[in-house]
Image (tube, helix red, strand yellow):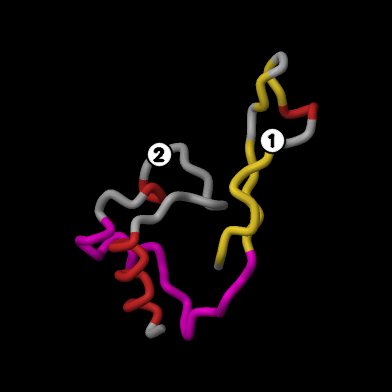
Amino acid sequence: SSVLMIWQAEPAGARVGTTPRWFSVDVQLQREFKRVITLPELRAQRPLARLALFRRGNRLSVLPVSAAEWKCILSLAGN
């Protein structure tokens, strides 16, 4: 996917005082993977050892992925 908007604050209800509690990023699908990659497959990849997805407390929505991590994921997907 590609990022359409860097970030935007969530609605007023998701605030702590005047500070936004959550932010969102608008993305657009560029292509689908040729196959599903399972979480155990991702965990088994040494280049993905520090992937934000594996850290406790992270949500599955949008997480940072380095260029090297993305290259590894694409190789698993067959893209």
**Compared with residue 17, is residue 29 higher up or lower down, i.e. above or below?**
below
- Is 42 colored magenta in this rendering? yes
What residue is at 39 percent from the left and 63 percent from the top? 39
Task: Identify which residue, 27 or 56, lies in the foreground.
Answer: 27
Q: Which mark is residue 9?
A: 1
Most distant residue in the top direction: 17
- Are circles 1 and 2 on residues that touch, CB within 8 Å? no
Q: Amino acid at mark 2?
A: Arg
Label 1 vs label 2, nearer the camera: 1
What residue is at 56 percent from the left and 65 percent from the top? 2
Q: Upstream in the sequence, badge 1 or badge 2?
A: 1
**Image quadrant containing the N terminus:** bottom right
| Crowding at mark 1 (Cα within 10 Å: few <14, some 14-19, many 20+) | some
- Residue 31 is left or right of residue 63, and the answer is right
- Secondary structure at badge 2 equals loop
- Secondary structure at badge 1 equals strand
Most distant residue in the right direction: 12
- Is 32 colored magenta in this rendering? yes
| Crowding at mark 2 (Cα within 10 Å: few <14, some 14-19, many 20+) | few
Task: Identify which residue, 74 or 26, lies in the foreground.
Answer: 26
Identify the image quadrant of residue 72: bottom left
The magenta segment = 28-48
Q: Which residue is mark 2?
A: 56
What residue is at 41 percent from the left and 50 percent from the top? 53
> Measured from the top left, where is residue 34 in percent x and y?
48, 85
What residue is at 28 percent from the left and 58 percent from the top? 48
